[in-house]
Image (cartoon, rainbow, N blue to C red):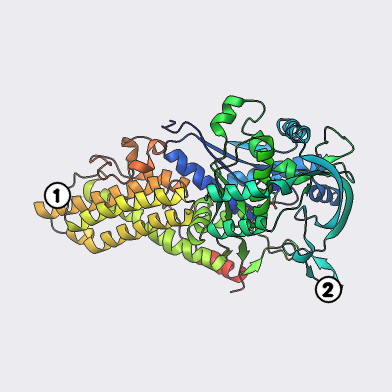
Amino acid sequence: MPDQRESAFYVTTPIYYVTAPPSIGNAYTTVAADVLARWHRQRGEDVVFLTGTDEHGQKVLEAAEQNGVSPQDWADHLVATEWMPVLDIVDASNDDFIRTTERRHTVRVQEFWQTIHDAGDVYEGTYEGPYCIACEEFKLPAELFDGPDGVKLCPIHERPVETLSETNYFFALSKYADRLLALYADQPTFVQPESARNEVVAFVKQGLQDLSISRSTFAWGIPVPWDTEHVFYVWIDALLNYVTAAGFGTDSERFDRVWPADVQLVGKDILRFHAVIWPAMLMAAGVEVPRRVFAHGWLQVGGQKMSKSKATAIHPSEIVDTFGSDAYRYYFMRTITFGSDGNFSWEHMSAVYMSELANGLGNLASRVTAMVGKYFDGILPEPAALTAPERELVEKLAQVAARADEAIDRVAIHEAVTAVADFVGTINGYVTEQEPWRVAKDDSDEGRARLATTLYAAAESLRAVAVLHHAVLPKTAAALWSALGADAIGPLADQRVQDSGRWGQLPAGATLTKGASLFPRIVDEELARLRVEAGA
Ligand code: ME8
């Protein structure tokens, strides 16, 4: 049910190149966006979560040629076999999926650039410079480094650049430098985190070069309407996906509700496109800029850059098949500071799984539901007066709920997840200290009352965990909600994170069931296999 906000919470991922199957790097952005989307839905907001694929340009053309098919067939194939299925694999709840070859996009791109052209910000010119096809980006000679035999290499892809020399159309980007600097000053959260903001401000302060926006040496792109010998440069086509999917130029009511985007997540490798070129394009067309562009860090595997040639790129399904989608999501959101670089290793993944999920949350939920089963026939008892340890739990819960919610506003996803994870540790500590299995041996009235209070407090705390962990652990939270008999309160989706810290919502009399364990212990052979694969 939409709440007081008039506009939707709009969150986007970059659209991914259909050159190869997804890696855990691409899925990292998708999962982060999904956690934000689910969190905001759980606040009762109207959420639009967009992802999709980037299908034009030289890089996709090359991939199609290498596979001996047309670029459109190649894109259709990869979208159907890889890019759509991976959304299910990581349990993404996107509301839309845009492909840049769709008509709803191509027509809008032509209209958008025709407007900028007619307003006088596009001119014909010649440019010669180094170009990295893997980045689809002109490079400055100073950015390159020398490879073997003095070949100039792209700093990101470590592959040779080409020299591109063409008569193209240019966008007068340089004239927007001052307006961009004013934007970064007036809207300090426009580029986040702070390190990314500083980098962008320093870059724009050096002055900007105009941008070549068309190509005439190949045809795989959207035709330039005023000169059909040219197709648009892939990036200035791709960036527009964020507005074309929001109804720009077709559905002004929807566009007003959805745009500007609240959070546009990008990897730090594509920050300049999103924090410099993108807002300048919007300014030229008189469209509002997004509220926040957030650059996350780069993922490595076992301390190494992922590369397909070295077979170090991991497909998300490799991890999900062993640990499940919830544990997958949890690992990346909980252990990596969002905005900094991170690392994945099988060893660390299994350690986090065992300690925080199987032995942590999973074991706690199973102990609590089992004890309510054993001592109260599965019916949640009425608690007696709270004592100091319960009052601490009540207070801690209120703080955790507020802290996690506030962290999400800063896109500090790891802080939100960690705050809830720490609370799971607090509940575990509470149960261990209260030793309900010992109290159960005392069948005096006081003993029964104490046991009832302890188990109620643990179950009620877990009720809040189900709501607060729902965004990162959707399947587990649903299973926990039902194991706690919390459907008596209402569906999990209707529980508001803002209210989750309020004590006493789980009604006495609810029926608890000890279902299957939330995080099955991975058998020793499986862990041994993972260790071997990790070379440990
Ligand atoms: O750049 N670590 O698409 P792309 C973290 N089509 N994130 C990673 C990563 C890694 N190792 N590898 C990839 C493009 N990513 C353009 C975008 S948007 C208008 C056009 C993530 O397929 C990261 O978010 O190369 C990166 O920005 C995104 O995948 C780009 O994927």
Quarter of the image with the N terminus is top left
In the figure, residue 72 lies in which quadrant?
A: top right
- Name the residue: 76% across, 50% down: 19
Q: Residue 393 falls in which quadrant of the image?
A: bottom left
Gap between marks 2 and 1 measured at Cα: 75 Å
What amino acid is found at the position of numbered circle 1 in the picture? Ala
Disc 1 crowd rating (10 Å Cα; few below 14, some 14-19, many 20+) is few
- Point 80% across, 71% down: residue: 146
Q: Nearer the viewer, residue 291 or 41?
A: 291
Mark 2 or 1, closer to the camera: 2
Percent x, y of residue 18: 74, 47
Judging by the rendered image, the residue that carries numbered circle 1 is: 385
Question: Which amino acid, mark 2?
Answer: Pro
Give the answer, above or below, for where 117 lies relative to 381: above
| Mark sitting earlier along the chain (2/1) | 2
Q: Give the x, y percent position of residue 242.
A: 64, 39
Q: Secondary structure at mark 1?
A: loop
Residue 455: x and y in percent read: 24, 52
Q: Position of residue 397 (x, y in %)?
A: 30, 52
- Whether pointer 2 and pointer 1 mark residues with C-beta atoms closer than 8 Å, the reply is no
Under tag 2, what secondary structure?
A: helix
Q: Can residue 482 be seen from the camera position used here? A: no
Return the residue nearer the eye: 383 or 409.
409
Residue 148's disc number: 2
Residue 152 in sight from this viewpoint: yes
Instruction: Pick the residue in front: 70 or 411.
Output: 411
